[in-house]
Each structure stands twice: as C-alpha cells, then as structure tokens.
Image: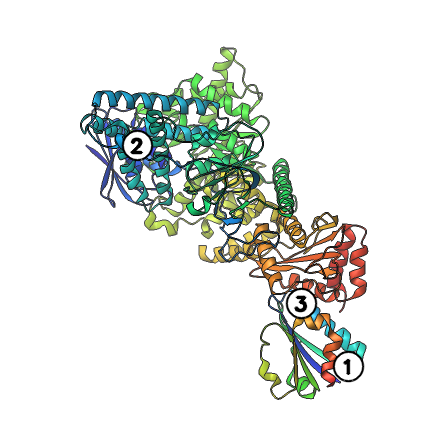
Amino acid sequence: MKIVAVTACPTGIAHTYMAAEQLEKTARKLGHDIRVETQGSMGIENRLAAADIRSADAVIFAADIAVQDGERFAGMRIVETSVQEAIKHPEALFGRLEK
Amino acid sequence: MTEIDFAFPLANGLHARPASLLRDACRPFDAVVVLRNRRRRRSANAASVLELVASATLHNDPCLLTISGRQEKEAAAALRHFVKHGLPHADDGAPPLPVTAPPGAAAVLPPVFPALGGRCLRGLSFSLGSGRGRALRLGGRRSLPKRFAAGKSDSRAERRLFENACRQVEAALGKLAERSAGKEGAAILKAQLAILSDPGFRGEIASLISRGKMPAGAAIEKTAARYAIVLRASASAYLRERAGDLDDIAAQLADRLYGPARRNAAPGGRGPLVVAASSLSPAELLACDRSRLRGLLLGRVGFTSHTAILARSLAIPAVALPPTTLARIPDGAEVIVDGRRGLAIVSPGTELKRYYRLEEESAGKRRQRLARRNQRPAATRDKVRVEIAANIAGPAELDIAWRSGAEGVGLFRSEFLFLDRAAPPGEEEQYAAYFQAAQSAGDRRIIFRTLDIGGDKPLPYLGLPREENPFLGCRAVRFYSGHADLIRCQLRALLRATALSGRLRVMVPMVTTVEEVRLARRLLSEAVSELSARKAAVPGHIELGIMVETPAAALALDGLAREAGFFSIGSNDLLQYTMAVDRGNAALAGLYDPLHPAFLRLLQQAATQARQAKRWLGICGEMAGDSELLPLLAGIGFDELSMAPALVPAARERLAQLDSNECRALLRRALRAEDAGAARALLREFNGRGGDAGVVAAELVRLGSKSRTPSEAIKELCDMLELEGRVGDSALLEEAVWKREETYATDLGLGFALPHGKSDTVRSASVAFLRPARPMHWSGKGSPPVQGVLLIAIPAAARGEEHLRLIARLSRRLMHEEFRAALLAARDAAVVVSLVNGCLRSAI
C-alpha cells in the first residue's frame, strides 16, 4: 500500500519525530510504501507534495494538535490517531488501514 | 539665601540611605537646609532623615535645596558638589535585589507536592533557599491599651517615660548592632536608630506630649502613624516599605512603656525552627538563634523591607503569606519554607522531605560552584585572561567587592576622605584608610586614584576659583601644581600604606599632557624622598599610571606611555568629552551613547597604542560593567574591566561564554557601523546567539542515580542543567516539564521516559540523561518500569536550528531497540555523550 502520514504534537520537541520514525519503521516491516511529514519544532519537514497525496491509498494523521494545511488531503481517506497511539501500537494502526 | 535646583537622580527615590547622606552633608555647617519637592509641593528639613524620606521624592522629581544661615556659602558649595557627585552614587555598592519571579497562579508542581491550598500554602518569596523546622508562632503586635490612648496626662511624667523608653531602645539596638556579625545587620539597626534620634520624629512626639497633653504611647503611635501614612501613600514601593521601620520603632518603644507584647523569638529547647509571625522587626530577627532558624513565614513584609533585606543577607529562606493563610500554620507543626517557589508546606510527608533534601544538596553544589568559579581567574571561553575588578569609594566596600568575586580594585576613589569637611585629612588619617585597603587586598591588584576634585567638585578649604564651565576648568591633576603639599601628603600616605605589601599602583585623573604626568612623577619622587628622610619605609615597586578621560589623552597615548606605566580608561568623562554632552542632562541622554562609532574607534585606537607601547590597559567607567557591551570590550582587548561590585558576578559569567576571536570580529563590524543604532543592532544580534556548546556533556549524565520517583528524577535532571548554567532557574523548568507531562506521560512503554519542556529559563537547548539505580514506575504502579530518563530542555524562543535538529534525530533514534539498549548499557558518561552526539551524524 502507498501511505502518506503527518505527525504533530503540542511542543513539537520529541513525539512528532518519534511517531514519524515509528510509522516509517513499521511500514517497512509490513512492506508498505510510506512518506511522513513532520510538523514540529523544525517547522514542516518532508512536506507532502500534491502528487504524493493524490497517488496515496491512505492517509494517517498521528497528531495531538490540528494538522497544518489539512485541506491538501480533502477527499482522501484519513485515519486519525494520537501521537502516543502511533508510537505505542503502530501495527494496530496499520491494521485499521486495511479495513 | 542660596538655592540649588536638581532632578532627583536615584531610581529608588529618596530613601533612608541617601537621606542620611544628605543630612550628613549638611551637618558640618551652621546653616538651615530645606529640601522642597516641587512636584509633591512638600518641604523637609534636611536635618531630619524622616522628613526627607516623608517628602516621598521619586526618581527625577524636580527638587530645590534652600540654604540659609551663617555658613550659607560653604554649605552651598558642599551641597552643590554632593548633589552632582555624591547623591547619584548613594546606592552604588548596594547589593542588587535578586529577582525571583513569583510562580504564577497556574504553576504546576511536581506530583510529590500535596495539592495547593491544603497543606501546601502559596505566598511570595522574599529570600531564596529552603529550610525545614517546627513552627514557632509569635503573637500579633499589640494595639495600644485603651487607657493609654486618650485622655489628659501628666505631661512631665509622660515626657520622662518617653525619654527613658528611647534610651532603653537605643541601648538595646546599639548592643545588638555590636553583636551582630554582618555589616548588613549593623547598617539596618543603625538606620532604625537614626529614626529614633531623628529631630522630626522625636520633636513631634515630645511636643504632642507637652503641648497636646497626650500620653507617651498615644503620642508615639500618632507620630509614627502620621509619617507612615505619608510613606505608604508613596508611589515608590521602596518608600512604602520604609513605613515598616517606623512601626518597628514604635512597637519597641511601646514594649518599653507597657511591657513586652509577645513571645520571645528565641525560645528554649532545641531543634530547627521556622518563625511564623504577622510581622518581625530586624531587631527581633537578629535576636533569633540563627543556628536553629531555618525559615521565616511572615504576614506583612515587602521585598525591600529591612527584615527582607536582612533575611537575604543572612541567607534565611523566607516567604510572605496572606494573613488568613498564615493563620493556618499551627504552632509546633513541622513546616518547610520554600523561598524559591514561594511555598510553605505544613507537615510534609517522607517523599517530600527526600525531595527537599535533594534541593538542599543542589543548593550546596551551586554555592560550591560559584566559589570555585570565583577562585579561577576570569577569562574568555578560549582562555584569554581579562581581569574583572571593582570600583570602590572607600575601604568599607572592599568586603562586598571580594565577596562578589572581584579580582582586584581597578579604581579606589580617594575623594571620600576629602569631602564634607572644613580642612583636608591629615597624612595619618589617610594612611589608616589606605593601609586598611592594601591589607584587605593582599596580593590582589589595587589601583589608588589620587584626588579627583576641582572646579566642579569644590572643596571649601582649597579655595579654587569659581569657573564659568567647571567641566572644562581646573579639575583634578590641573590643580595639583597649585596644591603640591596636599598631593604630596596623599602620596606619602599611599606610599607608607603599601610599604608592607611592597607595591603601590597610583593613578592620576584627567591627564591631557605629558607635562602633567611629569609633574605627578616629580611629586611622587619628592614624597619618596620626604619619607626616606624620615626613615619611613616605601614599597619596592611603585607604578604611576593615568586615567584616560579626554580624547587628547586617548589619541596621544603613545607619547604619554613614555611617562606613564599603565592606563585606565575613565569612560564616563571620555564619552562626555567626545560627544560634548553632559551625562546628567536628561534631554540629551540619547547622545550619551558609548556605541557611537567615534567613541568605539577612540577606544580601539587607545588600545592599539597601549599594546604597541606594551602598557597595561584597563577601563573603569560605567561602560565596563555593562554585560551587554562586554563582547565589544573583550574585542578591544582590555587587560582589566573595573565596575561596581554588584556587577562583577554577571561580568564573570558573561566573559566565560565569549570567544575572543568572535568578539574581535564583532568589533571590526561595529567600528564600521554608520551610527550607534547600527552598532547596537549588531551587538544585539551577537548577544542573542546562544553559545555553541553541544546539547549534552558528561556533566549532564548521571548513571546509577538514587532517584526513586519521577518527581525526583526530573528534579535531579533540572538541577544538573541549572548547575551547568544551561538553565536559569531549575524550578521553572521543572514546572514546564510537569505541565507537559500532564497532557500525557512521556514514558511510552519502551523502558524510557522522555520528559521535555520549553521555557524562557532555558539558555541553550540541552539534553540530560539519568539512569536510576532501580527502575521506577513513571505513570502509576502498573506502568512498565523505566530504566532511562532523558530530559530535553528547549528555550522558549528556540534559536539554533542545529540543536533542534539533533534533538529531533535523537527522538527518532530512541524508537530503535539497539539505540536504547546501548544507552542502558553505556558504562560511563562519555559513552552516553558520544551516543547522543552520534545521532547527528547517523543517517536516519
């Protein structure tokens, strides 16, 4: 599956990046193709381009705050979760995508 | 009648210290001096400190001194000088008030604390530190017994009672002042004694008793209340708090008249005590057994009240509580006073006691570190030595200077010996003062400045002519040739005073020509011969230096260097003469700016010439103590910066952060700036940059920590960061971290917790790591045990993307089992540091 994801936490210091890492690691393990945009203390990094989003099968928002520029994902199927869920139970999250 | 107009120069207003200086300045003369505050339309007799203070004069108030009487002329000359040169410095050397931000109402405390409002009471801190002891409640002060308060009385008997009470209080305070070791305590008691002997205060009480037929107690109460009302109505918090001194004195007098009103603050028994009282006088505080006193909880107290100042100088933790809160502290209960967070905690549990033991350990380490830093020579980060010295105006300030960490005295002003008197001081009197200073300095450098007085600072006994423009007139070295005896006398006293230490460094003010240096040298060698003729000892090394206070001296320094052994820039006068601005002229304050490129270039040229002539160069004007400007001064390459003692710690701290090459690069850019504003922008940008220390260091890693709970672990990590100077106040960081922790706990089931916080108190983005000796539960008993705690601290306005990038990568790495295992297995701090730093290099 081709997945795009956004991670964002309140302070943007640590969990944004931990969640991004966890999603990438788990996707590799499960054989998915993933691109993760982080919205944290470094600003927006690995910004998802319109083409990436359009060609994706699913979108994950692992965020405790509102995702910036969320309108980019209008019309897409979005699975929303908290940053901590993404870190603690990543495989369950990917399971939700399959449904 | 002579009148002197001026704007009141002190930021704290006319409080007791400057008021008593003004009174002392008037004292030698047979003249009546009245101060009129034109804004408040209030007049005060300058003989009464209380009346002066009650004039409620604030910073920049337009004031008028009116002088009349037999010695009107002499008094006017002395006062003119005092207003211009004494008064503006009346608060110099006063210890700066440590600023503690009272925690906001929404402050988050670590979970180890009981809920606020229950046993955990919030107040305002007025002296830092923490302590624990049994509460000793002192009762409230009595209001006057009714029968004494009104009705006619036998005025002669009441007068006698009053005079007796005054004598007893005077004796008691005097005795206490003698016994109290600290200078601060003695000075405060002296200020209170001054109220007692104040003609305004005492005269009014006496007249109420005699003419108003009032009982003594009522007269005291009425008079104290009248002055207190005036003070409490003042716009200056400082003056408002002086009302407390009046209450103290009135209460002590009442005690003598009617017997003590309340319990002794020094009870029998043993064990640590916390005194809880609605108010406490400095005398009562000094009477406490300090070996047992661990804290103060007071009702009515201001930050600058004498009791508060005394508590700080004695390092007794103290918190002010609202009266209703104070009433909830039971006598004899165990109490923790936390002067850092402004808390009083009644009957603390074991865990909280452990927490405060950690707090005390950290405070001890901080004190040691400060002491160690003051032992090391001041230098930049790249080890370029710059001596940090103090400017002082008499031997009394030496102790403060050494305690602040000054490495020497860059400017010993000798004027204090010469002012406010009818004849110059003799050689012996001067010798005693200089000898005391030389002894106190020991091996430290001390530079004595010869008499810096002239048309602008007239001394009646010098008989200098009145000048149209004293600042461009016969000042300092310019009158030496006409008063050679006076200067030789001073030089003899200096030579004798330093004979034992073996080295005299003497500095001549206001030099513009080589001829003036030769004159000073001639006077110096004459003084040496006079002493040799008397078979008196002189020091083996004698160095003659000059102050560089005129553009002429700064630009022709190479020529002067042939006669002068060392130089010190007097930046106040040098700037005034460079910019053609009187620094006291508020309307032109904007022009008086040391960042004007002309002035920076002048300093730079003087420094270059001094270096070429191989001469030592210091700077002792106000500019030297401005930490903001320090990068430029370090760039110019001064050998020494000399400043008010209170500014020394900040200068040492800032200097150690600077790199001399970066400072020189900054200077080069500032010298080319088009105006002061552009130079200031460069400086701001420079000062805003964080140091480039890494995010982690071995000192920020603790393996096998004794912490048992998240509260302790986070505290330990925050304290480590504070100790390393990366965080200003660890309690504020703790608060930020716990606030974050409240949204959801940062242990994520990986054996690690990753607490983090963003706060103004963080100076540079940092990571601290701790491995507890025993794994701890982070979020409740059922949570998986945590074996490693990694704390991240980020400045509120995070700059330096590089640090944030490292922390982002570190967070990612923590998601990898191997990395976590490596952190948990690391055998020492160095391994942890390299693992963390390795995150930046590793590709993710």
Label 3: chain? A
- Report the chain holding disc 2: B
Asked which quadrant contains residue B766, the reply is bottom right
Distance from the alpha carbon under mark 3 to that under mark 1: 22 Å
Q: Nearer the viewer, mark 1 or mark 2?
A: 2
- Image-quadrant location for residue B215: top left
Residue at the spot 81% in from the left edge and 59% down from the top edge: B822
For the residue marked with disc 3, what is the amino acid? His
Q: Which mark is residue B451?
A: none
Q: Tell me the element at label 2.
A: loop
Amino acid type, mark 2: Pro
Three-letter amino acid code at disc 1?
His
- Disc 3 and disc 1 on one polypeptide chain: yes
Mark nearer the viewer, 2 or 3: 2
Mark 2 surroundings within 10 Å by alpha-carbon count, few (fewer than 14), some (14 through 19), many (20 or more): few
Element under disc 1 = loop
Chain under callout 1: A
Instruction: Measure how far apart labels 2 and 3 are at the Cα level.
Output: 68 Å
Q: Which mark is residue A15?
A: 3
